[in-house]
Amino acid sequence: MLGWQVHFLPRPHFTIQELTADSFNDIDITIFSVGGSISKEFDPIAVEKGVTMVENRSVFRMVDRVPLVIPEVNPEVMDRIKVG
């Protein structure tokens, strides 16, 4: 899939690239739904660079410093997210 292009308006396309630590440069927010080992490796790198992580995996679910956000229960947790 590397090199494939995904069309997502309003941008003409995104090109699928290998995930590296540099992938998080100039990024505000990411949505992750990858294997736990990849999350453990790359989530801390992204957070260190100031990226807000939305993680679908359970790998950090019981970590005290990582908020569990359930929009129907505690939407106010998302108020602190700044994008742009």
Image (cartoon, rainbow, N blue to C red):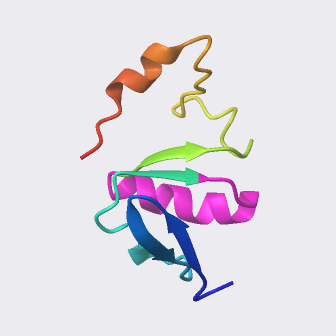
Residue closer to the observer: 43 or 26: 26
Q: Position of residue 77 (x, y in %)?
A: 45, 20
User: Is 23 left or right of 43, judged from the image as shown?
Assistant: left
* Residue 73 position in % (x across, y down): 61, 10
Q: Residue furthest left?
A: 84
Residue visible at 37% across and 56% down in the picture: 48
- Is most of the magenta stretch helix, strand or loop? helix
84 left or right, relative to 17? left
Residue 60 to residue 79: above or below: below
Residue in view at x 24 percent, y 47 percent:
84
Q: Quadrant of the N terminus?
A: bottom right
Question: Most extreme residue toward the bottom, as rendered?
Answer: 3
Within the image, what quadrant is residue 64 found in?
A: top right
Q: Position of residue 27 (x, y in %)?
A: 34, 59
Q: Residue at x 38, y 65 (%)?
A: 11
Q: What range of the chain is rendered magenta?
A: 32-50
Q: Which of 21/15 is in front?
A: 15
Q: Residue sitting at 62 percent across and 13 percent down?
A: 72
Q: Is residue 80 left or right of residue 4?
A: left
Is residue 36 located in the magenta-colored stretch of the structure? Answer: yes
- Rendering coords of residue 40 (x, y %): 63, 58
